[in-house]
Image (spheres, rainbow, N blue to C red):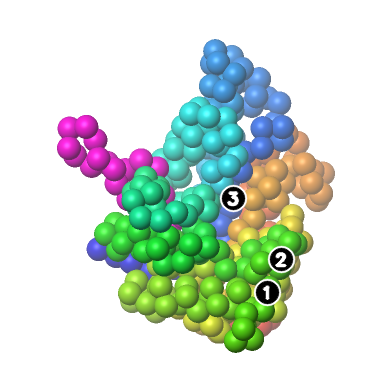
Amino acid sequence: MTNAADRLLDAIEEKKNPSVVGLDPRVASIPDHIKEEAMNEGFEPFERIHNAMIKFNHAIIDEIVDIVPAVKPQMAFYEQYGHWGVKAMEDTITYARSQGLMVIEDVKRNDIGSTAKAYADGHIGMVERLEGTKTSSYGADMITVNPYLGIDGIKPFIDVCKEFDKGIFVLAKTSNPSSGDLQDRILENGETVYEAVAKLIDEWGEELVGSKGYSSVGAVVGATYPKVGKKLRTIMPRAIILVPGYGAQGGTADDVVPCFNDDGFGAIVNSSRGITFAYQKEPYSKDFGPEQFAEAARAAALDMKDSILDALERANKMPW
């Protein structure tokens, strides 16, 4: 059995691209022609939303499959629509994996004991059927988790990662402006909460280090705090860092560079609406209309790739 971190790094190297596209289908921004088609293919309102999401996501995946190593659907944008939304999430993951993409499911789950195990089994492991056999529910390769409950809330996920060759990204320093309300607090020993969490992440990931030197227990560190990224990169040398905050939230290619190790690996940068809804924004809106939303996403994904690689090259961190 391979290691999930190794598989992700192999995919990054194959595509020569350390970026991931977030699939967050905001219904209001899905082009009208997609919504009109979906209206004619379902009877229930949420079934129609499911159909629109699937048409939109599949078109995006088809255009970026040769560019990016992975996609990252955010569960909140799906589950707000009940079981039809969850089905759209499941169908998106199934399609992405059928096209050879890895899937990082952004769910930020956490609990303790059997509840944490149920989350882990459902999202990255297997669950029991009535007849006694086991099957996968969502089938993601990796998920995001919250460390607030400590090792009691993390170990069930780690155990499932070991059993099924999966991975987790643990929140360390998030990209939102108010993250400092808790994460920047100074502890009695003089370190911040995010530094303490980073040390735990490095410790938690020790048993899941693959042949490439990286662990399947990764971390989430926002692009909007590059100085923090540099500090945490030192504390967690074996963690792959999932970097949100690029693009729409203000993070630049230069801002994400500190999250990479000197070998040019160790991070994967996310952009969501900056890619999927690029057709609504300059410069892409000049060349692509709503009918070409997927082509606009492709152009934006290529630009993101080039920007990150240019920044890595300037920092002497180009991995290939």
Residue at image position (25%, 40%) is 128
Residue 308: quarter of image = bottom right
Q: Are marks 3 and 2 in contact (CB under 8 Å)?
A: no
Q: What stretch is highlighted in magenta?
A: 125-143
Residue 9: quarter of image = bottom left
Q: Residues within 10 Å of mark 2 (few under 14, many from 20)?
A: few
Is residue 57 rendered to the left or right of residue 313? left
- Which mark is on residue 185? 1
Which element carries disc 2, helix, strand or loop?
Answer: helix
How far apart marks 3 and 1 lie (CA) works out to: 30 Å
x and y percentages locating residue 174 in the rendered image: 64, 64
Look at label 2 and name its amino acid.
Asp
Q: Is residue 161 magenta?
A: no
Q: Does the magenta stretch include residue 142?
A: yes
Q: Can residue 197 be seen in this view?
A: yes
Which element carries disc 1, helix, strand or loop?
Answer: loop
- Which mark is on residue 181? 2
Considering only order in the chain, which callout, 1 or 3, is on the residue closer to the N terminus? 3
Q: Main secondary structure of the magenta part?
A: loop
Look at label 1 and name its amino acid.
Arg
Q: Are marks 1 and 2 in contact (CB under 8 Å)?
A: yes
